[in-house]
Amino acid sequence: MKRRDVLKAASLAFVSTLTAGYGSNDMAEKEIRKKATKKPTGVLKKSKNPKVLVVGGGWAGLALAKHVKIFAPQAEVVMVEKREHFVSCPMSNEWLVDLVDLEFLTHSYIDASQNNHYTFINATATDIDREKHILKTSRGEIAYDYLVFAVGIEYDYDAWTHGDSVLEERLRNEYPAAFVPGSEHITLKHKIKNFKGGNFILTVPEGNYRCLAAPYERACLIADYFMHHHIDGKVILMDESNHIRIKDKGFSSAFNELYKDRIEYMPSAKILKFDLDKKVVETDFDEIEFEDASFYPNVKSPYILEKLNMTKSTPYNRVEADIDQYTYKVKGTNNIYVCGDARPMGFSKSGNTAFSEGVNVAQMIADEIHGKTPVWKSPVTTCFSVLRTKPERTISLYTEYRYTKNGGMDFTNSMTDEAWKTNHLGKERVAYAWAESMYRNMFY
Ligand SMILES: Cc1cc2nc3c(=O)[nH]c(=O)nc-3n(C[C@H](O)[C@H](O)[C@H](O)COP(=O)(O)OP(=O)(O)OC[C@H]3O[C@@H](n4cnc5c(N)ncnc54)[C@H](O)[C@@H]3O)c2cc1C
């Protein structure tokens, strides 16, 4: 048997409890599935090979699935992901204004799993049986010894809508945030391309939202697009915070020097009322009319973690995963982890951070498998933002983290390069090179 066949056989044994919830004309396959479903051999007791199950094929989940196989090759690894293919959020601002094409952002989960020797199951995780160590999914049940939720974020509209679900659905559909991949991004791109002029509102939420830099970068790139396409439009950037949250020098100088007439930056601009029919929003101080908008609300941890009673409220966000910050284990459990943007710690909710954390948690799980004591390591944040296109200019930031003696979080080894006027010696391409190397690492 070749190595690839051995791996395939191991993976199939692991997922043998998947129920046949979809049509197949192949009688033999049906028969195998029927038997497997009736008799989930080896699923309820621990087999020799530890089973590591990852829910979520984003930056954290992809890194984790790959690296568990590297650090503990004997582990059987399965990744359950509800999307059919991967579309990257990082570099999607560049895609909105045609700097990269969709192919650059889009990758195959089948490639990722085949190239990195784990099993990909295209399904939605819905519940767990903690006693029996079973994950329930839209395609059946899967056993685990170690379960990792790397499920990213969901939007939390409550601070705006106070439970008004009609308003929430209108905001989601008429003015999507485009901070979770999918239709929202396509709609936002159409909005930018078809914009006829006037105010285009973008918002920056409070708390620890996904990708601190992305709303500021998006404002620059949309303003740049309006300029080069002779659209008489202005970006109104309404920030709930009283200052630019990241790379302040770089962004504020870009707003002032490149986009003085194209971006109006409004700090402490919390929207208190939406009149979507009249296209007006109200803050404590102003009433602002708009032609079009993309409203980015607060974020929270995805519903599945709430449903499983694995959440708490933090100073950052209303609903976040309730885990131990050193071990990533869900409080009260010994084999269920959360990592990536769904974590509650104050680390940047960004792709590079999630990826490096996926690697770290993979190492911790491998250590457990090998009977060693896992050691916490800092995730790493690397963040590039493109400020203009002709000529292209980019700013960047790097940071690691440490915990203080009282368990608080601090930054360490931080550096930024925000001197966009003089930093053009090839650095403007670094953002693209970073993304390409990350895709290569996760998929190929
Ligand atoms: C416009 C934009 C620009 C950005 N730019 C950058 C950048 O330049 N650099 C950077 O480092 N980061 C950037 N980010 C942030 C980055 O995209 C996120 O931080 C990163 O995706 C987080 O990874 P994750 O794995 O935690 O979550 P995700 O990537 O969101 O992955 C979570 C996955 O879990 C799946 N899932 C959720 N629930 C279930 C379930 N019940 N069953 C099965 N699957 C489930 C989801 O479908 C999803 O694929 C940007 C984000 C945006 C929106």
Image (cartoon, rainbow, N blue to C red):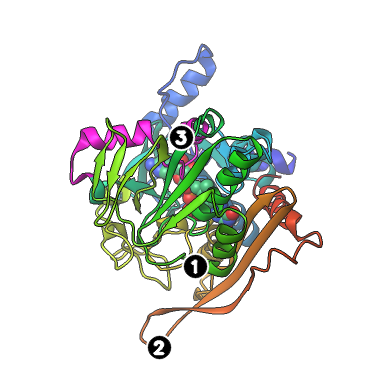
Measure how far apart labels 2 and 1 are at the Cα level: 25 Å
Q: Amino acid at mark 2?
A: Lys
**How far across and how far down the image is residue 101, in percent?**
68, 35
Looking at this view, is 418 or 267 the one in front?
Answer: 267
Circles 3, 2 touching at the beta carbon (< 8 Å): no
**How far across and how far down the image is residue 392, in percent?**
72, 52
Q: Which residue in the protein does label 1 denote?
A: 368
Q: Is residue 59 visible?
A: no
SS for tag 2? loop
In the image, is residue 186 above or below residue 179? above
Magenta stretch? 161-188
- Of circles 2 and 1, the one toward us is 2
Q: Which residue in the protein does label 3 denote?
A: 184
Most frequent secondary structure within the magenta stretch: helix
Q: Amino acid at mark 3?
A: Glu
Categorize mark 2 by other alpha carbons within 10 Å: few (<14), some (14-19), many (20+).
Answer: few
Q: Residue furthest right?
A: 425
Circles 3, 1 touching at the beta carbon (< 8 Å): no
Please tell me the numbered disc located at residue 405.
Answer: 2
Q: Earlier in the sequence, mark 3 or mark 1?
A: 3
Residue 393 sits inside the magenta stretch: no
Measure how far apart labels 3 and 2 are at the Cα level: 42 Å
- Of circles 3 and 1, the one toward us is 3
Q: Amino acid at mark 1?
A: Glu
Residue 180 sits inside the magenta stretch: yes
Q: Is residue 325 visible?
A: yes
Measure how far apart labels 3 and 1 are at the Cα level: 40 Å
Q: Residue furthest left?
A: 163
Residue at the image point whose x is 73% and y is 39% from the top: 1
Q: Earlier in the sequence, mark 3 or mark 2?
A: 3
Categorize mark 1 by other alpha carbons within 10 Å: few (<14), some (14-19), many (20+).
Answer: some
Residue at the image point whose x is 45% and y is 52% from the top: 150
